Image: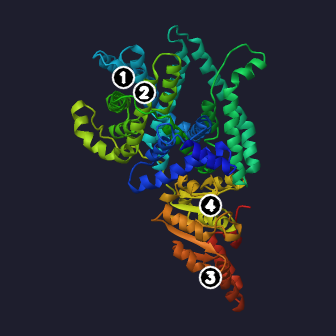
């Protein structure tokens, strides 16, 4: 089968790597459609595609290492997107809950997991006999999947909730603990503090350099390309991989500068830092909305590649032990994570939510287990156990995300019995308040609308959001009291991240001839899907466009030329009736000053 597929690709003149990528994507697409129809989690389709194409199936892929290398780009982009979503101010508001839980969770979970597998090993089960197997299986129970958690938080729009922020914060702490473990791993027989110290020093140095360059150089670069959203993404990706490569080669760079210290970091950590340094910039939403699709492509390859690495089980014992690891990993979330979060001040509903969302084995553990086998600590069979445990928990994760609220209701009686009771306080707000009014674009119409709002309804300005790419006007818009966000209004992801789905009224202020890659009709159709309960007002240039835009979901469609004519007609009638001076005087009184105050705009 492998020979025939390769010969077909070669006959068509297709390079082997391109052929392998094509097979991965075709298999993933076919199974994704079938699994979605059967209401089976999509991740199962991606893993299944890998199994079908891999050594356990048709053995159709000839360049597995190349696929794995490309798939690792998905992890790098994932960490970059995580960095973009990190709101340091929000994380710091978690205070003691995040810091104490993040510091204690991994050591406590690892200790309990190690103890549990040592006890199981005392039964004489050969797969779990010895200290190292118990240690690595305990590690598998201690870390959660950054890739899965962030993916589902994004899909469910929960990244900016109390539970979402804490989950991401704890994942960052877990990454730090993983760095510690990886630094110690080669020297378990003779542990040394030096590699750990150099890793932390390298990470700190990378943070300082990236923060300074982002503040004084990158911000200027973004400003130069701000009017071209696609170039903003290009600059952002260049920044991501630039900082990542600097992190991967930090030791070499430092040594060439004449410093004899072996500092180290990693490309993945560099990507995370790169994202975090621009998370508070006005361009973050635009970058997230565009990078997320590129990231999903590589993440698809990651899971297909993982499916290829799933070996044929040597015995039923491998599957049984994998199931035990998965069960212990999930149980420890509720036996350790939940009490820690509650004890450090989090309400019990969010404590259950965070624990549930982090209930899986981490892809990081696959790397740790693989390195453990290379160092002779464990066998390839144990690596298979960790892989299968990851697969089991990965398939359960979508179900846990979907049922976390119902699970909390079922756990309430148990929590009351063990002393984890409601503190009787008002629940924290899940996210920032959505804007009531959204102005899409800031062309002349949007500018005039904001001026009239300032004059007639200033109380509405703090609840008004302007989405536009002209950053030169943003300070003036904020000065008037409105919110403003950099973003391409044609991107549904930008609008979703901006909270447009929660708005009461959405106004498209930009005419079709100035829109790039969309039209008011298409924009309204997207908005109606995103915000089914909002009042949508759009504009058009011709009368013939009114009905199609209304059919797309607009509640009201206006023509700028008609609106201007209606505004001028009263002055024309007054002039024809020789009452123009009195009309202008009345208009001035109505506007609280000169008539031109009504049309004061931001240039």
Q: Mark 4 points at which residue?
A: 490
Q: Distance between the residues labelled 1 and 4?
A: 49 Å
- Dot 2 or dot 4: first in sequence order is 2
Q: Which residue lies at the image location 39% right of the left edge and 50% below the top edge? A: 40
Q: Residues within 10 Å of mark 1 (few under 14, many from 20)?
A: many
Quadrant showing the C terminus: bottom right
> How far from the left and from the top, in percent, is residue 445?
66, 68
What label does residue 544 carry, if any?
Answer: 3
Residue 396 against residue 554 in the figure, above or below: above
The image shows a total of numbered marks equal to 4
Closest to the observer: 305 or 175? 305
> Is 221 situated left or right of 109 in this image?
right
Q: Which residue lies furthest to the bottom in this view?
A: 577
Q: In which quarter of the image is residue 105?
A: top left
User: 529 above or below 165?
Assistant: below
Q: Which numbered dot is residue 329?
A: none
CA gap between label 1 and label 3 equals 68 Å
Query: Mark 3, mark 2: which one is toward the viewer?
Result: 2
* Residue bearing mark 1: 113
Left or right of 34 in this view: 469: right
- Callout 4 secondary element: loop
């Amino acid at each position: 089968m492998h020979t025939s597929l390769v010969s077909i690709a070669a006959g068509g003149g297709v390079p082997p790597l391109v052929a392998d990528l094509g097979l991965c994507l075709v298999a993933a697409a076919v199974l994704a459609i079938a699994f979605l129809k059967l209401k089976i989690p999509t991740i199962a389709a991606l893993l299944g595609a890998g199994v079908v194409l891999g050594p356990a199936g048709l053995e159709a892929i000839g360049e597995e290492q190349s696929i794995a290398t490309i798939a690792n780009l998905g992890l790098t982009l994932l960490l970059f997107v995580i960095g973009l979503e990190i709101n340091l101010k929000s994380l710091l508001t978690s205070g003691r809950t995040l810091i104490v839980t993040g510091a204690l969770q991994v050591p406590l979970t690892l200790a309990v997991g190690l103890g549990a597998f040592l006890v199981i090993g005392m039964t004489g089960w050969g797969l779990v006999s010895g200290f190292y197997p118990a240690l690595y299986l305990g590690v598998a129970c201690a870390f959660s999947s950054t890739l899965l958690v962030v993916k589902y938080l994004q899909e469910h729009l929960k990244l900016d909730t109390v539970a979402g922020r804490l989950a991401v914060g704890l994942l960052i702490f877990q990454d730090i603990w993983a760095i510690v473990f990886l630094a110690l791993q080669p020297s378990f027989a003779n542990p040394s503090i030096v590699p750990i110290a150099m890793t932390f020093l390298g990470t700190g140095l990378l943070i300082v350099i990236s923060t300074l360059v982002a503040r004084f150089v990158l911000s200027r670069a973004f400003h130069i390309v701000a009017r071209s959203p696609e170039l903003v993404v290009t600059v952002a990706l260049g920044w991501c991989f630039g900082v990542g490569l600097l992190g991967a080669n930090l030791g070499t760079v430092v040594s060439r500068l004449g410093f004899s210290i072996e500092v180290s970091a990693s490309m993945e950590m560099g990507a995370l830092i790169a994202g975090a340094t621009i998370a508070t910039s006005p361009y973050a939403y635009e970058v997230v909305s565009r990078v997320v699709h590129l990231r999903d492509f590589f993440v698809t390859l990651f899971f297909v590649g993982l499916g290829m690495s799933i070996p044929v089980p040597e015995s039923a014992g491998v599957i049984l032990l994998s199931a035990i690891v998965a069960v212990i990993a999930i149980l420890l979330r509720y036996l350790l994570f939940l009490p820690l979060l509650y004890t450090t001040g989090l309400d019990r509903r969010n404590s259950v939510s965070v624990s549930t969302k982090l209930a899986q084995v981490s892809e990081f553990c696959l790397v740790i287990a693989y390195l453990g086998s290379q160092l002779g600590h464990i066998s390839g069979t144990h690596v298979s156990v960790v892989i299968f445990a990851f697969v089991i928990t990965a398939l359960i994760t979508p179900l846990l995300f979907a049922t976390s609220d119902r699970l909390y209701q079922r756990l309430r009686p148990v929590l009351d019995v063990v002393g984890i009771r409601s503190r009787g306080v008002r629940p924290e707000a899940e996210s920032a308040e959505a804007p009531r009014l959204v102005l899409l674009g800031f062309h002349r119409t949007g500018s005039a609308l904001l001026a009239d709002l300032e004059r007639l309804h200033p109380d509405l300005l703090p609840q008004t959001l302007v989405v536009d790419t002209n950053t030169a006007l943003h300070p003036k818009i904020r000065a008037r009291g409105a919110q403003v966000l950099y973003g391409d209004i044609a991107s549904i992801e930008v609008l979703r991240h901006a909270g447009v789905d929660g708005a009461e009224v959405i106004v498209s202020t930009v005419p079709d001839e100035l829109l790039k890659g969309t039209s008011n009709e298409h924009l309204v159709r997207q908005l109606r899907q995103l915000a089914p309960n909002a009042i949508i007002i759009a504009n058009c240039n011709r009368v013939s466009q009114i009905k199609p835009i209304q059919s797309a979901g607009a509640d009201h469609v206006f023509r700028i030329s008609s609106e201007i004519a209606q505004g001028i007609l009263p002055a024309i009638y007054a002039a024809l009736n020789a009452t123009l001076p009195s009309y202008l005087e009345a208009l001035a009184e109505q506007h609280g000053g000169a008539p031109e105050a009504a049309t004061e705009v931001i240039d």
